[in-house]
Amino acid sequence: MAGKKTYSPNDQHKSFFKIIAGQNASENDLSRFFRACFLNSPVFAQIVLTTIWREAGLSGSAPKADGWECNYQPATPVHGGGRLDLCLMPPSGLRTKAIQRPIFLESKVGSPLTEQQLQRYKEHGTEVLVAITKNWPEVSQAWLKRNRVKSLRWQDICRELRQTKCHGQQNRFLCDRFATYLEESDMAYREGISQSDLLDVQSLLKRIASSEDDGGVVPRASFKVAGACIELLKDVKRLVREKLPKSKFTGWKSWGPGYYHEREDNSITEHAFGFILYPKIWHDQNFRCTIGFPVSTRKPYLLLHREQGGEMFRERYLLIRSILSKRYLDAEKVANAVVKAASDWRVP
């Protein structure tokens, strides 16, 4: 029957919500799943409310989620503004307090976030408006700040669901399944990349590049970790551009993040995930940020590298442990290391 979702044995490898939504998950699916988790898991509700409060920079401390409601596709308070995706409503007795107003959420999965849409919502009574996006918002941070619109990414929600300890079987199930749904729907990537994970990736890359016939290898999660490294480096590149003065890298082009390798005597000596910034022709001058995986016994590391006139001009190696937070790779720390090197080396 058209439109009917059926179960197959392969579905056991998919997330709970992915089975329900099918292959083409939409913003409506995401909003409905979010609401179901919010209403049925006090832990999920507290995690997302706290995350929204902190990441969106709402005033005061995040409140307890007890008594909060989650409405699906609410109309704007003033008639004529259309419908948003979700609204978090505080307990009725608290709605008159300045810091306990309804929080309207506009979720973006694939469609772009536009100034016109957000402006319409603001003009029709949404005092606290938060955009939750898959990618970095297309609307500039300056415009969002000027128009009192807050923003965060589904990545922020996923991170907290993964890193916060959940008590109770139902709470653990819903928090884990929603985070898995975000990752499998390509709305978030796995951020929990440990040094041990990088060693597994290094081992896999060595085996792939080896000329020996050793009967193959079972990669486990290494390919997913490699993909997550690329996604993390995308965030690093974005953070670097935000942290540096606007005059820095103006007009520069970029390559990656992607994969490349170094060779000596027709043998691969090092695998790398990274991005390159360059003004016109990257051979003349470039600045690289790379997670390196040597083929030797040396452990993975972060490499910051400046080249000028086809020759290495500056180079800085950092131990992986220096860019970890709570045992995991931290995009903010990597970006800070890049910014410091660019400043020390006066790039550009």
Image (tube, rainbow, N blue to C red):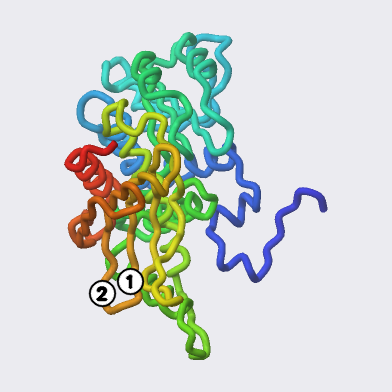
| Residue at left offset 42%, top offset 58% | 173
The Cα–Cα distance between marks 2 and 1, rounded to whole angstroms, is 6 Å
Q: Residues within 10 Å of mark 1 (few under 14, many from 20)?
A: many
The amino acid pointed to by label 2 is: Arg
Foreground: 208 or 9?
208
Instruction: Give the residue at mark 1.
Output: 294
Q: Position of residue 135 (x, y in %)?
A: 47, 38
Q: Is residue 116 left or right of residue 162?
A: right
The part of the image, by quadrant, that contains residue 155 is top left
Q: Is residue 102 left or right of residue 60?
A: right
Residue 99 appears anywhere in the view: yes
Q: Position of residue 25 (x, y in %)?
A: 61, 46
Secondary structure beneath label 2: loop
The part of the image, by quadrant, that contains residue 345 is top left
| Residue at left offset 17%, top offset 41% | 344
Q: Which mark is residue 298?
A: 2
Q: Is residue 99 above or below residue 1?
A: above
Tell me how many marks there are: 2
| Residue at left offset 52%, top offset 50% | 186
Residue 197 appears anywhere in the view: no
The quarter in which the C terminus is drawn is top left
Confirm or deny contact between disc 2 and disc 1 (CB under 8 A).
yes
Foreground: 167 or 252?
252
Q: Position of residue 82 (x, y in %)?
A: 58, 17
The amino acid pointed to by label 1 is: Pro
